[in-house]
């Protein structure tokens, strides 16, 4: 018997749930009524923000593991018509099936005997996840709303979007989070465009210097390591030094906020590099942890692995030497995040109601245990309440910010609309 973990990042509405279905008995043999539901590590809120779904399934009881195929499906309670649910398959047909091959997955088994499949992104009908489109939509959403969107990766370490107004620094970072150091991965033109609101009245060309001074005036250490979001060579080049700087800051007791424009790619790479290079977490464990804390994150495996060699050559001996001078207790490898309990398939089969957009592809053929079947594709310890004032600004036109969240480890900082301000002033 093996236990396999499935993880999916997808953009869905609140009424949608996600399941996994596949070619083996434990995954329903392509029968949607027997699909295994996943649970949201981060529940969906809007279609502009990703949610992360995860679940464990026990497979091949009493027999040797074998290759199988699988897909993710989404179920909406409001889109089926005539009171039924609507099912949606990712991709289009068997060509977009996913594969699990035992021989290739041995290295991805974690200590408690769970095989971690790659964190997947939902495939649109053309087979592509359209990551760039989703990323752009998320960026423009937080940009237009002047929001600072961030996630707590681990104690004293946050990753997120850039500050857009002074209060994001003076109260969002300093007061609400207790940040004492930041690492900025934006290019100069990014700073001048996206963080110009932090320096009102300052010419665009002077924004980088003014931003640095703003951090200094409020006692926050500022490290600027520009990286080009669309140039892999640039990201590989800056990643080792950025990870090393993050390690230096954390080990000296700083509370660190790492950011880029939207907190999706460049800043996420630095946090992933820290968990992977410095703390030594297995790659898939790191990937699942980061996505569970920040589903919108793009974990670029190619960049992380390409930069690893340079990091070890330049800084690996320093990291090892520091570990060797620490106490025996702190020298122990950092434990990976706790693995949530397995999610079992429902004990009672669910019938597909009238109105569901799905058919059972396997009714007309008998399938033996372990047989791979072709997919005949059917054509809160801490909480900040909404509206709670968690800081007062120095600028009367931006007099407070609101931290809105449904869970502890993901927060956004934004401000009231002009209409809301007028009401408050009255």
Image (spheres, helix red, strand yellow):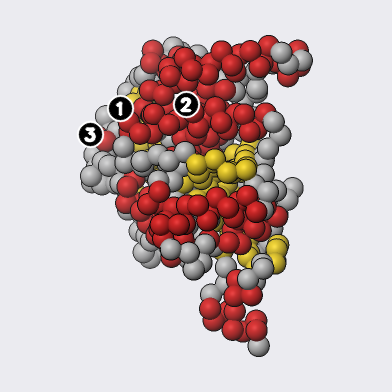
Relative to 74, 214 lies left or right: right
Q: Which element type, helix, strand or loop, lies under badge 1? A: loop
Q: Quadrant of the C terminus?
A: bottom right
Please report contact status of discs 1 and 3: CB closer than 8 Å, yes or no: no
Q: Residue at x 45, y 57 (%)?
A: 206
Which of 354 and 126 lies nearest the eye of the viewer?
126
As drawn, 192 above or below 368: below
For the residues labelled 3 and 2, the Cα–Cα distance comes to 38 Å
Looking at the image, tell me whether mark 3 or mark 2 is earlier in sequence order. Answer: 3
Give the image quarter of residue 69: top left
Relative to 42, 230 lies left or right: left
Label at residue 373: 1
- Residue 344 visible to an observer of this rendering: no
Looking at the image, tell me whether mark 1 or mark 3 is earlier in sequence order. Answer: 3
For the residues labelled 2 and 1, the Cα–Cα distance comes to 45 Å
Farthest residue, direction bottom:
426
- Residue 216 visible to an observer of this rendering: yes
For the residues labelled 1 and 3, the Cα–Cα distance comes to 14 Å
Disc nearest the viewer among 3 and 2: 2
Label at residue 95: 3
Q: Residue at x 26, y 36 (%)?
A: 96
Give x and y (percent) for residue 306.
38, 23
Q: Which residue is mark 2?
A: 240
């Amino acid at each position: 018997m093996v236990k396999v973990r499935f993880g999916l990042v997808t953009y869905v509405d609140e009424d949608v749930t996600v399941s996994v279905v596949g070619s083996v008995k434990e995954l329903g043999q392509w029968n949607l009524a027997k699909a295994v539901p996943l649970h949201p590590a981060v529940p969906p809120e809007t279609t502009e923000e990703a949610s992360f779904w995860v679940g464990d399934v026990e497979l091949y009881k009493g027999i040797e593991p074998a290759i199988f195929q699988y897909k993710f499906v989404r179920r909406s309670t409001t889109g089926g018509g005539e009171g039924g649910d609507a099912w949606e398959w990712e991709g289009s047909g068997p060509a977009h099936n996913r594969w699990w091959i035992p021989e290739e997955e041995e290295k991805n088994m974690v200590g408690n005997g769970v095989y971690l499949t790659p964190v997947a992104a939902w495939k649109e009908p053309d087979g592509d996840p359209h990551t760039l489109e989703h990323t752009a939509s998320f960026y423009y959403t937080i940009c237009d709303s002047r929001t600072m969107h961030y996630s707590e990766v681990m104690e004293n370490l946050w990753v997120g979007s850039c500050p857009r107004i002074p209060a994001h620094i003076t109260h969002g970072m300093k007061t609400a989070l207790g940040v004492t150091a930041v690492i900025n991965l934006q290019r100069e033109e990014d700073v001048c465009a996206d963080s110009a609101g932090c320096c009102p009245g300052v010419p665009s060309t002077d924004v980088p210097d003014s931003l640095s001074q703003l951090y200094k005036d409020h006692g926050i250490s500022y490290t600027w390591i520009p990286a080009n979001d669309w140039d892999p060579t640039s990201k590989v080049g800056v990643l080792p030094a950025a990870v090393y700087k993050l390690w230096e800051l954390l080990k000296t007791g700083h509370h660190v906020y790492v950011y880029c424009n939207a907190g999706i790619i460049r800043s996420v790479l630095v946090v992933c590099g820290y968990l992977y290079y410095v703390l030594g977490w297995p790659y898939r464990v790191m990937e699942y942890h980061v996505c569970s804390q920040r589903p919108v994150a793009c974990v670029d495996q190619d960049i992380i692995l390409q930069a690893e060699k340079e990091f070890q050559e330049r800084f690996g001996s320093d990291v090892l030497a520091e570990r060797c001078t620490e106490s025996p207790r702190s020298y122990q490898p950092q434990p990976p995040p706790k693995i949530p309990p397995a999610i079992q398939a429902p004990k009672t089969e669910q019938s597909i109601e009238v109105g569901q957009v799905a058919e059972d592809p396997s009714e007309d053929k008998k399938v033996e245990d372990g047989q791979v079947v072709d997919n005949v594709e059917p054509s809160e310890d801490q909480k900040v309440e909404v509206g709670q004032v968690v800081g007062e600004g120095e600028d009367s036109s931006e007099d407070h910010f609101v931290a809105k969240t449904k869970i502890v480890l993901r927060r956004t900082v934004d401000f009231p609309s002009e209409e809301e301000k007028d009401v408050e002033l009255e």
